[in-house]
Image: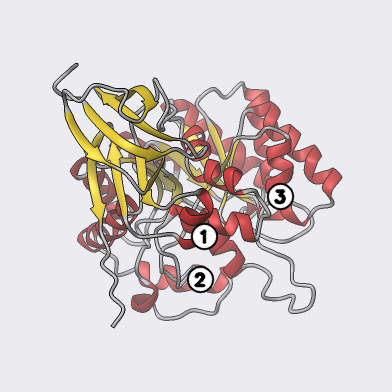
Amino acid sequence: MTATALLLRGARLPEGQVRDVLIENGRVSAVARVAQLPSACEEMDLSGFLLLPAPAEPHAHLDKALTWDLAGAPPCDLPGAVAAWRGYAEQVTEEDVLVRARLALDELVANGATAVRTHADVLPGADPLRGLRALLRLREELSERVALQIAVLHIEASDEILDEALELGADLLGGCPHLSDDPQAAVARALAIAERHGVGVDLHADEHLRPDPKDLLLLAQAVRERGFAHGATASHCVGLGGLDPAEAARIAKEAAASGIGVVALPLTNLYLQGRDAPARTPRGLTAVRALLDADVPLAGGGDNIRDPFNPVGRSDPLETAGLLVAAGHLTLPEAVHAVTTGARTVLGLPAAGPYEGAIADLLAVRADSLSGAVGASYPDRIVFKGGRAVSRTTVIREAL
């Protein structure tokens, strides 16, 4: 047994069994009935805790985080949020982004996320990559606690700016084809630039409720035609949720055939979308059931954290799981999978969890079942990255 071993005693697994879990060199090496594993290493008693694969946050905007009050409360729709953020972004500095992003990322880690993908805007002004540089600094600073992926997000930035961003160290190229006059050309351009740098793409796709979603289908077709091999993700895909089931299923199968991952973002999209239809309001949620039925890798993400796009959000993947149950009608295991293993799959990360051979990225939450963990979202949590505890939250409650 190695010096890096840790034995977790008496943890309840997602399937309900109570087990001891042995971690060695960052991986789970054994799972056994209580008291059957030797005790010649450091131990931690997890009696009363449910042990889950650590969540991954597949879609954040850390450069925007915590600016709702700073930017002023905008009209509560997507165009209003975009305008409010653009106005505030004029004065954003690298240090400002670094401070706010660190606070938001600390919240995500404390709630269980050991991997996060954030988008970083190309900002207005003479130094458009100042936000990206702040996030690159944060990625290095917190690398032992969380794996941070950065997608540079642009609408009209030049090839030169995007080349510079990717050369600085951005991991992926983002974009918003539905905001372009020619979505097909926007998708083709994103893939071409990403291919040149050998990185993947994560596009904001069909973030609207119009009955003609194109971005996901265009991305699926372009990935297949180009043989794009660096990984493609479509985030939002709200328009897919407004189609009739047969058409949604057809597009979902196209996405599955192209190997695209889809990120559902219920918190922000339920808040922003549908405000112009007060009767029979359509919901801002992609067709999660059709995507699952088509075997599309599906992740659930939190998106905005108290910024002009959404004044709420706790930086808690279990909150996202609860929304996928309530609004998306997923089962509890499906919803938890979307914010844990499903999210890691979309981010291109190896499997984690309390299972032999898996990476020991784990979340212990004080609960006795998935319904307790998701429904009550208890704050008592211990977060493990690579088998090492990186955060612990303990709450004391008193009846007076």
Name the residue rendered at 71%, 61% in the picture: 209
**Which residue type carries mark 1?**
Gly
Q: Secondary structure at mark 3?
A: loop
In this rendering, the answer to whether 328 lies above or below 290 is: below
* Nearer-N-terminus badge (3/2): 2
Classify the position of the C terminus by image quarter. Answer: bottom left
Location of mark 1 (residue) = 375
* Alpha carbon separation for disc pair 1 and 3: 22 Å
Q: Secondary structure at mark 1?
A: helix
Classify the position of the N terminus by image quarter. Answer: top left
Q: Nearer the viewer, residue 6 or 236?
A: 6
Q: Position of residue 21 (x, y in %)?
A: 33, 29
Mark 1 neighbour class, 10 Å CA radius: few under 14, some 14 to 19, many 20 or more: some
* Alpha carbon separation for disc pair 3 and 2: 24 Å
Name the residue rendered at 20%, 60% in the picture: 95
Q: Is residue 320 left or right of residue 187?
A: left
Q: Residue furthest bottom?
A: 400
Residue 223 in view: yes
Location of mark 2 (residue) = 81
Q: Is residue 258 left or right of residue 303?
A: right
Mark 3 neighbour class, 10 Å CA radius: few under 14, some 14 to 19, many 20 or more: many
Mark 2 neighbour class, 10 Å CA radius: few under 14, some 14 to 19, many 20 or more: many
Residue 170 in view: no
**Which residue type carries mark 2?**
Ala
Q: Position of residue 252 (x, y in %)?
A: 73, 38
Location of mark 3 (residue) = 287
Name the residue rendered at 61%, 33% in the picture: 260
Residue 289 lies in what quarter of the image? top right
* Alpha carbon separation for disc pair 2 and 1: 30 Å
* Nearer-N-terminus badge (2/1): 2
In this rendering, the answer to whether 23 lies above or below 45 is: above
